[in-house]
Amino acid sequence: MKIDSSVLHSKLKEFFGFDSFKAGQERVITHLVEGNNAFVLMPTGGGKSMCYQLPALVMEGTAIVISPLIALMKNQVDAIRGFVSGNDGIAHFLNSSLSKAQLAEVRKDLLSGATKLLYVAPESLTKAENIALLKEIKISFYAVDEAHCISEWGHDFRPEYRRIRSIINDIGFSPIIALTATATPKVQSDILKNLGMPDATVFKSSFNRPNLYYEVRDKSDPKKDIIKYIRQHPGKSGIIYCLSRKKVEELAELLNINGIKAAPYHAGLDAKTRADNQDAFLMEEIDVIVATIAFGMGIDKPDVRFVIHYDIPKSIEGYYQETGRAGRDGQEGQCITFYSYKDIQKLEKFMQGKPVAEQEIGKQLLTETVAYAESNSCRRKLLLNYFGEDYGEENCGACDNCLHPKKQFDGREEMALVLELIQSLPERFKMEHLSNILAGETNSIIKSYNHDKLELFGAGRDHTIRFWNAVIHQGLILRYIYKDIESYGLLSVTDEGMAFLQNPYELMLTEDREFVDGDDDPDDDMAAGAAVRGGGGGDDRLLSMLKDLRRDIARKLKLQPWVIFSDPSLEDMSIMYPITIDELKNCQGVGEGKARKFGKEFLELIARYVEENEIDRPDDFVVKSIVNKSANKVYIIQNVDRKMPLEDIASAKGLEMEELMDEIEAIVLSGTKLNLDYYIEQTLDEDVVEEIYDYFLEEAESDSLEDAMKDLSSDYDEMEVRLVRVKFLCEVAN
């Protein structure tokens, strides 16, 4: 079916309360509605669910959504029912948790055509009675969520996902949309091949999550560090991942003893305890969930503010997926990982006894994780490179390596040596083998190939194996070296690498960080504390009351609080003071359905609050712009705190001074204080500062820059006035 863009936008507003789509959503939706196969790669929080939820609501028939976890299904069904008022039959899930009466209700709604979305576990899809039922209804399309589960190269391979295509063929053909938040090029290929849709259009959004801060810390005293960190962020929701069930239990108990509301979650707990602990987290009764990866895909909570890995994950994909649980609402999210090589040794032991091919895959994935943890390069750049995406910025401003850059060196000779070695070998080898050759380290494999007799053997013995691993890894990022994943990581030189080898030029590289168990490095103290700050500009007291009401209603209805209204929606209410349904609909993320279904008690509370506090409501609602949570903001705050000259900050981010001042003013106007005294004292005369400051203090009728330039002496240039205005706003207005 053809559908006009204006109709899609109208339905988006009607059902979900949004005025516009996130990047890439509309193209995917239009493509699917027109009856085409699609493969969607979007980061967690990028809006994948909308890509099949909205088409399901506007297309004829029922969309079959294949989803791996029961908890996730229930959350999504609750969310859809919340958006579409007065029709609980609009969405159902079909799995082993349903009673006979519930199954009968699902069947009735399906056959009557009332159900637009049916969530099915892959195991349930294989049952003959369910296949027979689905054959009786009109299916609009199939959505395969968490599609990376199809591939054995993915971080969460599930054999039952391999059968999806054959079952679809049995039920009857309809378009297929496969969706995942994490997939390497190899995993992408596996998905398309297994679902039998090699010609599907691939929609790939950037995997960059600019609101997330990444840090890897020495695992010297992780329990103390975690408790300290959580106490510094009171009331924030977070997830802590551990490798073992025992560690999950111990850490959850330790947190509770120290006054932190926490609960464990792992596969060894009975189903009721797992469900109760998850619900307590979702309902904001506890702040922290301590979990194994069993908790990975079963969480759909947008306001998780931190994800801590007590143990290093098994793969970069797993790490990306788990850290992606933070900041799904686009606001701050901090990802802290504790690393020790002992964790790697534990993971290697876990792989013993598995089939050789599985061990090779596991070792290759683990090698990538080690390289990420020990690297001094930008973590965002490393992550995006792993997923086949280039990140152009030299400094992301939101990872530990960029905020605390290590000393660089001209590595043209070292890189040339690596490329020369790869080229000289008739066969291809993995990174560790090449590093051993250059460092002059012998082992049985090197001797078997007579590589200890090579001219280049020991050519780089002045450096360690770790050093050469770092050089090779940076060669991969620069696209000088290609790694063949299907051949378990064998390396070759690219055309770009050949060009460099023929004509080497200055190449700034960093040595990898040395992690030593038991040493506490004060320089690595959590930079995340001040990494992402911001304010909404609303009525904080009212906002707190609205959150309390939301929590009470959520408990009563047994829904997650965000299903009622998201945090941004409540923040808008605290700014706009809506007291009618029509006014409430103007708040971010509030559509007609939500306003009528949940709005009554919120409107009554706001009306009462407005009356009791004699608040003058604006005649016309002003739409608030989204608070800037960009990497620029993070970088500026951090480096102003470190008293870096503004010219250097601007240069590092590729900004003109005027553009930098725009960013600084936006930060200050959002409620964040910045102390520019160090810069002002160096660049402005004391009398100039005093006169401009006194103007804003005593004469100015507003903070208008235009008015200030008119009223002040022509002796002052605009930059001087802007700097002092920022100082005034921070000291007096904020």
Image (cartoon, rainbow, N blue to C red):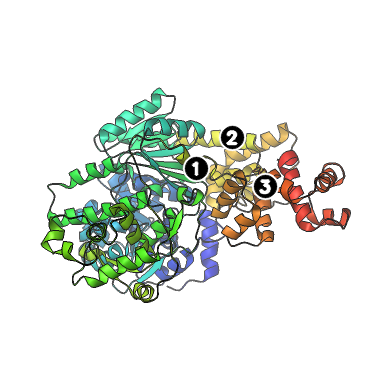
Above or below — where is 222 with respect to 117?
Answer: above
Q: In front: 481, or 411?
A: 411
Q: CA distance from mark 2 to mark 3?
A: 23 Å
Q: Position of residue 166 (x, y in %)?
A: 20, 64
Q: Residue at x 72, y 34 (%)?
A: 611
Counting other residues with Cα less than 10 Å from the Cα at mark 1, is it few (<14), some (14-19), or many (20 or more)? Answer: many
Q: Amino acid at mark 3?
A: Val
In the rendered view, would you say 48 is above or below 669?
below
Q: Position of residue 320 (x, y in %)?
A: 37, 52
Q: 617 or 232, which is in the foreground?
A: 232
Q: Quadrant of residue 277?
A: top left
Q: Residue at x 82, y 42 (%)?
A: 697
Mark 1 and mark 3: Cα distance apart in space: 19 Å
Dot label at residue 528: 1
Structural crowding at the residue carrying mark 2, measured as other residues with C-alpha within 10 Å and reported as few (<14), some (14–19) or many (≥20): some
Q: What residue is shown with label 3?
A: 668
Q: Could you tell me which secondary element the residue under label 3 belongs to? A: helix
Q: Is the N terminus in the top left, top right, bottom left or bottom right quadrant? A: bottom left
What x and y, as percent, mark residue 369?
31, 51
Q: Quadrant of residue 492?
A: bottom left
Mark 1 vs mark 3: in front: 1
Dot 3 alpha-carbon crowd within 10 angstroms: few under 14, some 14 to 19, many 20 or more:
some
In three-dimensional space, the C-alpha distance between marks 1 and 2, rounded to whole angstroms, equals: 25 Å
The amino acid pointed to by label 2 is Ser
If you read the primary sequence from the N terminus, does the residue marked by circle 1 or circle 2 appear first? 1
Task: Answer left or right for 550 relative to 170.
Answer: right
Q: Amino acid at mark 1?
A: Ala
Asked if labels 2 and 1 touch by Cβ distance under 8 angstroms, the answer is no
The answer to whether 655 appears left or right of 714 in the picture is left
Q: Which residue is mark 2?
A: 544
